[in-house]
Image (tube, rainbow, N blue to C red):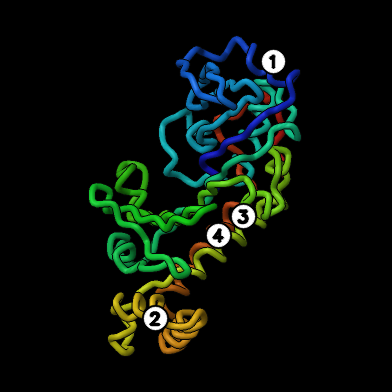
Amino acid sequence: MIDLFKIKITDETLINTVWSNPLLEFDGKSEKRFDDEVKELVRRKYKNLYFTKFHNRLEIKGSLHYYFNNEEHNANDFYISDCINTILELHETFNLVLDKCYLVNLEYGVNINPKILVPDLIHNIIFHEKRPFNRPRNFDYKIAGNEAYKQIKAYDKSVQFPNNCNNAFRFEVKSKQAKFINGLGLFTLQNLTDRICYNVLINSLLNEWDNVLLFDKSKTVDDKFFNTNFWDDIIKNGNRNKFCNQKKIYFRKLGTVNLHSEIRNLIERKTKYLKSVHIPTTINLETAQYKILF
């Protein structure tokens, strides 16, 4: 469920412990100005994870999902138990004190297989809240809705990894500021070893999908509801509640069974599936130094 992550460590003793780990390989250095003083930044890496040492902190970022899959891909299902065990492995490998590893950014989401072709689905995803999705010209299988503190992404995962999945729709949330994650009650890597905390991420994902305006052209409703100019005009000229009110009218006309509700049900079903316990076949349970959490 969790893909990209970024943490910071400010405890000097822990920084020195992690930074001196012989597994880290030099990856480059640069300079950055802090308070009118130029300081050197050194970057090291381990597998697909990057460690950057600032003058006052250590940042670690990368994809937990890629790491779990030996850096090959992130197209399969990443169970919550897989994610927890990956964090515990990093804890063992780098002697991390998890409650001193502060979350800066997280990216979380699910892959589902809708009945509709994913390119058609993406084509009809129009707004998140009152913000239109961006559609990059050279990346037309992926759209993103940007806000100050988060990014909502919807794309065809099978275009990225055609050998690993088929007609796979990825819906995910990417935080852009720590305060968004903190607002969910998540502060450190320690929180992400607690299965209960993942319910917050699941609810967040479902809430963000609820804020998506999707054109369901399989339904017979007034054509104005499938006209982006109609919605743009409401945003520009309507009162603050008109967009939400019209959206409610639109969904009411679609009926309780519609494409949007079907996708939501698939997302919810997948999150329940990912909460089930998964024992990775790559782990030798007799010799593993970390525990599978049941």
Name the N-terminal-most of marks 3 and 1. Answer: 1
In-image side of 8 versus 118 (left or right)? right
Nearer the camera: disc 2 or disc 3 = 2
Which residue is found at the position 44% from the left and 85% from the top?
246
Where is residue 20? Give x, y as percent.
64, 11
Q: Which mark is residue 237?
A: 2
For residue 92, above or below residue 293: above
The type of residue carrying mark 3 is Leu
Three-letter code for the amino acid on which mark 4 is drawn:
Leu
Looking at the image, residue 253 sits to the left or right of residue 14; the answer is: left
Residue contact between numbered discs 3 and 4, judged by CB atoms under 8 Å: yes
The crowd level at tag 1 (other Cα within 10 Å; few <14, some 14-19, many 20+) is few
Which mark, by number, is residue 205?
4
Q: Nearer the viewer, residue 169 or 221?
A: 221
Split into 4 quadrants, where in the image is the C terminus? Answer: top right
Q: Tag 1's secondary structure?
A: helix
Distance from disc 3 to disc 4, alpha carbons, whole Å, reads 6 Å
Q: Residues within 10 Å of mark 4 (few under 14, many from 20)?
A: many
